[in-house]
Image (cartoon, rainbow, N blue to C red):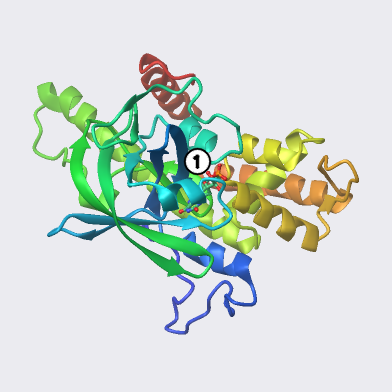
Amino acid sequence: MPASIPSPSQDGILQPTETGDPAADGRLFRRCLGHYATGIAIITAEHDGVRAAVTVNSFASVSLDPPLVLWSLSHTSRSYPLFKAGRGFAVNVLSSAQMGISRHFSSKVEDKFADIPWSPGEFGSPLLHGCLAHFECDNHSHVEGGDHTILLGLVRRASRYEGEPLLFTQGQYGVASSHPEASPAPELTGTSAGDMGTAYQQMIFSQLFKAHHVMSSLFYEHRRDEGISNSVARALISIYDKPGLTIDEVARDAYLGQRDVEDALASLRRRALVANSPDGRLSLTDEGRRLREAMLTRWKAFQDRQVEGIPEADLRATSRTLTRLITQSGFAA
Ligand SMILES: Cc1cc2nc3c(=O)[nH]c(=O)nc-3n(C[C@H](O)[C@H](O)[C@H](O)COP(=O)(O)O)c2cc1C
């Protein structure tokens, strides 16, 4: 079966999962925007000896000649006056190893630069260490856009480093992997017995990506039947496993952005799955716990269906190989 991401318009009829007027429903607007995957950047600036930094996913390229980029800044940001008054800014594009940095710079900590390695850039803005790219910019222009200001920067210097980007989509952080259809598995046919080991070795890596892609596509379909989005499911699991967390703690535990966790909680509350507590500590209602347990049962049944007919010895060998691949790379299995 080919790996295909299920589309809600399969029968030629447009049937969105949800639709509406974004002016009347901001959360719906954000959920729809969340389907456009982006990278993550920290925008930094210094003005009169004071530094500011914000996590953004609104960064985009604009023009090659002259070299222009843009990003948009909320008027509610504490850093708004500094970015408006400053001469320029630096765009620090995060690598997949910097999820913690993204969370740190989107938080309300007082001194965002304490304990973070950075160096002053030649054009006046701080450059964070460990990033994938830096764009050092002079202010080009500011354009008002509703509750945000769009800041266009004239790029004075662009630098890149080796690594993988940090991604953000549907309220969650991610890493990039090549699409399996863009890197087909090498064929084993015509390979001599002596070369079989090498051929399997080559195949297993592309198969790993393909298996992951196929399984997540199938599981996505399964999750859609439950009527629960990814971020709602993550928040639900987090509160089930650790009752008594605050919203901020759920955001950290479920690796969700602040607004996405608020959105997920609003959805859980609407469905009476999360209990109201005066001290802001979250717990599930009986109905919420039942839903989480039903999800676990379905997840187990999904796994059973996928491995049906594969001998246990093969599953054990696969698991041993995967564990070894993971631990040899220094990650916990
Ligand atoms: C993934 C992600 C993307 C964000 N993108 C933006 C953005 O494009 N523009 C913006 O103003 N805030 C964005 N934010 C929120 C800011 O990071 C956050 O409000 C800001 O850092 C608060 O800083 P301040 O009030 O100390 O200035 C984003 C947050 C996250 C987690």
Identified by mark 1, the residue type is Val
Vertical comparison of 128 with 225: above or below: above
Q: Position of residue 302 (x, y in %)?
A: 58, 48
* Residue at 69%, 35% in the rendered image: 249
Q: Nearer the viewer, residue 326 or 156?
A: 156
Q: Is residue 96 left or right of residue 185?
A: right
**Residue that carries the numbered disc 1 in the rendered image:** 307
Vertical comparison of 42 with 320: above or below: below
Q: Is residue 257 left or right of residue 199?
A: right
Q: Position of residue 235 (x, y in %)?
A: 68, 46
Q: Nearer the viewer, residue 308 or 297?
A: 297
* Residue at 17%, 30% in the rendered image: 199
Mark 1 neighbour density, 10 Å: few (under 14) some (14–19) many (20 or more):
few
Residue 329 quadrant: top left
Q: Is residue 295 left or right of residue 208?
A: right
Is residue 282 among what the camera can see? yes
Vertical comparison of 27 with 107: above or below: below
Q: Residue furthest right?
A: 278
